[in-house]
Structures are given as C-alpha cells and as structure tokens.
Image (cartoon, rainbow, N blue to C red):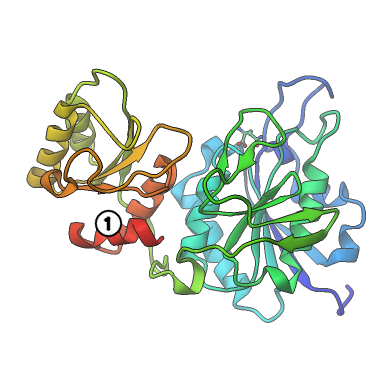
Amino acid sequence: QDTDLPNVKILATGGTIAGAASSATSGSYSAGQIGIQTMINAVPGIKKLADVSGEQVANVGSQDITVEIWLKLANRINELLASDDVDGIVVTHGTDTQEETAYFLSLVVKSDKPVVTTGSMRSSTSISAEGPLNLYNAVAIASNPEAKGKGVMVSLNDQIHAARDVSKMNTTNVNSFQSPIKGMLGGVFYGRLGFFREPNTKFGNTSKFSITGVKELPRVDIIYAYADMSPDLIDMHVKAGAKGIVIAGVGNGNMTDAILKAAKKAYEDHGVIIVRSTRAATGWVLRDNEFKDADYHTIASGDLNPAKARILLMLALSKGEKLNDMQELFYTY
Ligand SMILES: NC(=O)CC[C@H](N)C(=O)O
C-alpha cells in the first residue's frame, strides 16, 4: 500500500467488462464471468494511479440489475465514502442499464467525492477489448480532486458524462455512450483528464432523496407508445399494481386520445401518477405542448428518458411526493 496515493474502491457488478467468450472474434459471449481481482490485474499501471481494492457486489449482465442491487450498491457507496480512508469509487457495470444505475446513484449518494461508473462494449476476451483502458480511466477520474462535486459520472471511450444526461445510443459500438442534449462533462486520455462544463441539476448532497431505511421502491412501469395503441394497456398496469406509469410517448410525449383519457382516469380513480416521456432518442418533453397537462393530471419528463423518468418517479413516490410537486421535480432533478 502506498499511503501517498488516493484510495479508490472498485465495486464490481458484472457486465461485458467482466464477460468472456470462447473466441476473441465472436460477438457471442456471456456477461459477468470474471471477478474483480482478475479485472484489476488486467490493467497495467492501475496501482500507480491509486491504492485500488475491489469488492464484488454482484456479477450479472446489467439486464438483470434489480432495485435490490441498486439499494445494496448505494448503501455500500455511502458507507465507504463516509470514511476518510476512501477518496473515490468506481463501479464496473454492464452497459445496457448503466445509465439507470448511475442516475439512481446520483440521486441517493450523499457525498461530493467522485463516483464513476464504467463498463465496456467488448468482452474481456475480445480482440481490442476496451474494458481495461476504461477501468484505468475511471480510476484516474475517481482519484482526481477536480472530479469532486460533479455527481455520479459515466466514463467509457475516453469520455466523461453526467449520469443524468448520458444514454446508451448504440447496441454494439464502443462510442455508444453519449449525452445528446447537453454534451459530455469532460474527457480523459490515458488517465489525464479535463472538464468542459458543470452538471446543472440536483444530485448528491443537494438531492432531497435518500435511501436510508428504504427496503423497496414503489412499482413504476413504462409503456411504449405507438400509433393506435389500445387504452386498456393503462388499466392492465394499474391492475398489476403500478403506482406510477411512464409513457414513452410519440414525439413530444404524445399518446392517443384514448390513452390520455385512460391516464386521467388512472389518477382520478387510483392515484396513479402518469409521466410523459418520449420514445424519440433525444429531446425535451415540455409541459402544455399539445394539450394542458393539468387537464389530464400528467407530468412532463423534461429531458429525462423513460428509464430515468421511472427512477425519479419511484424515488418521488417512495418519499410520498404528491402530484402538485411532481412537475418541479422533473425539471430540477
Ligand atoms: N456491453 C455490455 O455491457 C452489454 C452486455 C450486457 N447485456 C450488460 O449490460 O451487462
């Protein structure tokens, strides 16, 4: 142990970065195969950046990440960052739901020390695997004092993104992660890094959300909108126990007139909160665009995509937030 170096804890959850295949040139592989120590050993020079140690929190493809894993991970991060012995955290994670985990953490981690999630698009046994460099860069960010106070960051492919703003935009490309509306926060090149802008929403110490004592979150479902969709979809989700529904609407959070009426009824009869997001890859969903949201008790998601709008709605419902305060939350978190 080198006491002059920052202390960085790596919490591993699985994903392609921990994936392995029988062939270096096959796109078929299994996620979450190798352990954290093997991953650390594959990164030359990592021990010169920081005193790194790893913990295995889960080892799954991120399609199998659960609220239970989110709570376990967030609680562990809060516990570690409360200690003077830990300067920053790296989370290794599959890319499919990485933006969800990162956004969730950004709302409930109570520290201004850096937390960086990373992963890879190519498995550890692939030709030109990029996981080791991504992990090297993530550790460099987590150990850099300049990265303090920027919330949870997502770093792959030499880029640093704000958890809230980033999305996986491509199914296979190493340049998959992008922040299409606000752009990246900064860049990192073999551990040298710089920031271009500040995140401008609430997170970390300024977030009103906390998971202290929280064991589960209310059910919030997402419904994908399309032409001529049937309004009984809303009833099905309400019957299944959803306390909130996010509509991945067409365009600016639109949906058929029949769905809109069903949404209004879901709130009036069952108190189910309906948030309008979009199935479009990027863009704002603003209040009162083609109808008055108040007439249907709907909330506009701002620039939160459906998966992230779901997370904010789950946390808001678990805190007992009411319809009247919801719109403000979606514009500020
Ligand atoms: N590139 C990846 O990480 C995607 C693979 C896997 N489905 C996961 O999210 O863990």
Task: Report crowding for label 1: few under 14, some 14 to 19, many 20 or more residues within 10 A (C-alpha).
Answer: some
| Image position, residue 28 (x, y; %) | 71, 21
Instruction: Tell which residue pokes out farthest to the bottom in this image.
Output: 84
Respond yes or no on whether mark 1 lies under 8 Å from ligand 1.
no
Please give left or right for residue 244 compared with residue 40 in the image: left
Q: Where, quadrant-wise, is the N terminus in this rendering?
A: bottom right
Please give left or right for residue 266 compared with residue 134 in the image: left
In-front residue for pair 65/48: 48
Please name the residue that numbered disc 1 is placed on: 327
| Image position, residue 326 (x, y; %) | 26, 58
Residue 295 lies, with reference to residue 231, above or below; the image says below
Residue 204 lies, with reference to residue 218, above or below; the image says below
Q: Can residue 177 be seen in this view?
A: yes
Q: In which quarter of the image is residue 289?
A: top left
Q: Where, quadrant-wise, is the C terminus in this rendering?
A: bottom left
In-front residue for pair 169/31: 169
| Image position, residue 27 (x, y; %) | 73, 21
Q: Is residue 318 visible?
A: no
Residue located at (10% from left, 39% from top): 265
Residue located at (48% from left, 55% from top): 104
Ligand 1 sits in quadrant: top right
